[in-house]
Image (cartoon, rainbow, N blue to C red):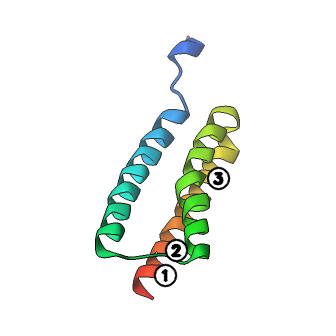
Amino acid sequence: MKQSLPAEAAPSPVRPAFTVVLLHAAVLLAHEVAHRGLGVDLQAWQLAFAYLVIVAGPFVALGLIGVRPRAGYLTLALTMGAALLFTVYQHYV
């Protein structure tokens, strides 16, 4: 007969997302340092998007994952996808 794990031994849905958000934050910090060192300034709308979606979005998603995992992971996927599209467009188009 298969035994289920006690609730405290069940893996947390937050742990993998926390790792992704932490790595994302580290890359953001390095990217910000590079931008400042090169004297690259963003326009007001770019700053708003960057801080609201790219910086804050993954942390909001992380908070949601603990309460509503499906909504949290969807928010994380959308904000990370938006960050990727914004970055590709701003750097290469």
Q: Quadrant of residue 77?
A: bottom right
**Where residue 75 sits in the image (x, y, percent)?**
64, 53
Looking at the image, is mark 2 or mark 3 nearer the viewer?
Answer: 2
Q: Residue at left 60%, top 53%?
A: 57
Residue placed under numbered mark 3 in the picture: 74
Residue neighbourhood size for the residue with mark 3, other residues' Cα within 10 Å, grouped as few (<14), some (14–19), many (≥20): some
Q: Report if the CB atoms under discs 2 and 1 are less than 8 Å apart.
A: yes
For residue 24, the mark is none
Q: Report if the CB atoms under discs 2 and 3 are less than 8 Å apart.
A: no
Please name the amino acid that badge 2 sits on.
Phe
Is residue 2 visible in the rendered image? The answer is: no
Disc 2 to disc 3, C-alpha distance: 18 Å
Element type at marker 2? helix
Above or below, comparing residue 87 to residue 17 in the picture: below
Is residue 41 visible in the rendered image? The answer is: yes
Looking at the image, is mark 1 or mark 3 nearer the viewer?
Answer: 1
Disc 1 to disc 3, C-alpha distance: 22 Å
**Where residue 43 sits in the image (x, y, percent)?**
54, 78
Q: Quadrant of residue 30?
A: bottom left
Residue placed under numbered mark 1 in the picture: 89
Please name the amino acid that badge 1 sits on.
Tyr
- In depth, the one of 46 and 90 nearer the eye is 46
Q: Earlier in the sequence, mark 2 or mark 3?
A: 3
Element type at marker 1? helix
For residue 86, the mark is 2
- In depth, the one of 8 and 90 nearer the eye is 90
Q: Quadrant of residue 66?
A: top right
Please name the amino acid that badge 3 sits on.
Leu
Q: Earlier in the sequence, mark 1 or mark 3?
A: 3
